[in-house]
Amino acid sequence: MKILIAPDSFKESLDALDVCHAIQSGFSQVFPDADYTLLPMADGGEGTSAVLSYVLGGRWKEVRVHDPLMRPITAKYLLLPDATAVIEIAQACGLHLLTVAERNPVIASSYGVGELIADALGEGAKRIIIGLGGSATNDAGLGMLTALGMTFHGADDNMLGQGGGELANLQRLDNTGFHADILETVFEVACDVTNPLCGESGASAIFGPQKGACPQQVIDLDHALGHFATICDAHGYERCQEVAGAGAAGGLGYALMSFCHAQLKSGFDTVAEVASLSQHIADADLVITGEGKLDEQTAMGKVAGGISQLAKATHTPVIAICGSVDGLKPAQTTQFDVVMPSIQRIDSIDNVLSAAYHNIETTAVNIAAAMRLGQSVR
């Protein structure tokens, strides 16, 4: 029996590879001779680079860059053997890099993201996969583009500073110093956010508050993003502000589309394509996937839902192991052949998270034992 184990991470407890090992450990106690393939998965957010490193190899490159408040930090990205670089923007401008008191999208900058891209280009990358998610910024890529050689000018032709608040002062931009390799490079953006740049469902309104913006700052930042897009339109850049995903990562989606001709794709689809997931599923007799919580978002571009859709094409049975099932009607779980929560007992959240490996392993043993019983009964 060929068993493909392809889960997402269980947030705050186990990364995707550890989940793979827990499931394999449980199943192999019942089916020791099965042929196991471990394929940890991600949906384009945090952990995507680590997943692709496990699947495809490559090497990590550490770079000194600037964090959202322009302080020097060390970030890393992945270089794959086929001249592809995988960059998670949170490495350079992630919300986790700031304390709660430091969060302020009016001044937070994406400059470090541009430094990572520039370094990857210097390493000869011809294709750059960028995972958008977890940003502290709302600057529409102002910092990133500045690090790549663009200049932005306000009144009296003074150079703009950093942060989303500065966008309101923009009068003109100059691309004469823009990195020469940008337009010769394929940019693919892994993004599951569908928000436009501006408006009630835009970057500022939806994500600004969690990045530290007060209600008035949300309004000001939204106007600043709109002004930035108007100036870019006037300079002949592609009008992308209404495109789904333009508001991702505080407008980095907009900048990457407008200035780097990036393609925005589902994060799961991007990882699945690079990892040849469809082929692995076609070769398997059984697929086991999972995530920390199975809920209404599972079918909306998340790993477990995406795997179930691919498995249907080859009529491969799918088992989903999760921490919990939340808010799903019975009909919504029919995309899987089995759905099994793994929490073994009522306990504090800290204890549940710390026991995740044991709980997943135990659940895998029980599922495998039920399968073995079913075989013997027949």
Image: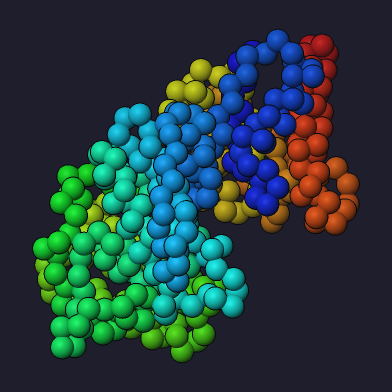
> Which of the image's four quarters has the C terminus?
top right
- The colour scheme of the drawn protein is rainbow
**Residue 120, image quadrant:** top left
- Residue at left offset 42%, top offset 42%: 61
Residue at the location (25% across, 38% down)? 124
Residue 347, placed above or below residue 369: below
Position of 365 relative to 198 (above/below): above
Residue 181 shows in this picture: yes
Is 10 situated left or right of 175 in this image?
A: right
Q: Nearer the viewer, residue 130 or 270?
A: 130
Q: Is residue 374 visible?
A: no
Location of residue 318 in the rendering, given as x and y in whole percent from the top left corner: 62, 30
| Residue 154 horizontal side relative to residue 65, left or right | left
Q: Report x, y in % for residue 343.
A: 81, 44
Looking at the picture, tell me which residue is in the foreground, 233 or 109. Answer: 109
| Residue 60 appears left or right of 35 | left
Residue 9 in picture, x, y percent from top left: 62, 43
* Residue 194 on image: x %, y %: 41, 60
Residue pictured at 43% horizontal, 34% vertical? 59
Q: Quadrant of residue 254?
A: bottom left
Towards the viewer: 89 or 310: 89
Identify the residue shown where x is 61% and y is 38%.
Answer: 16
For the N terminus, the image quarter is: top right
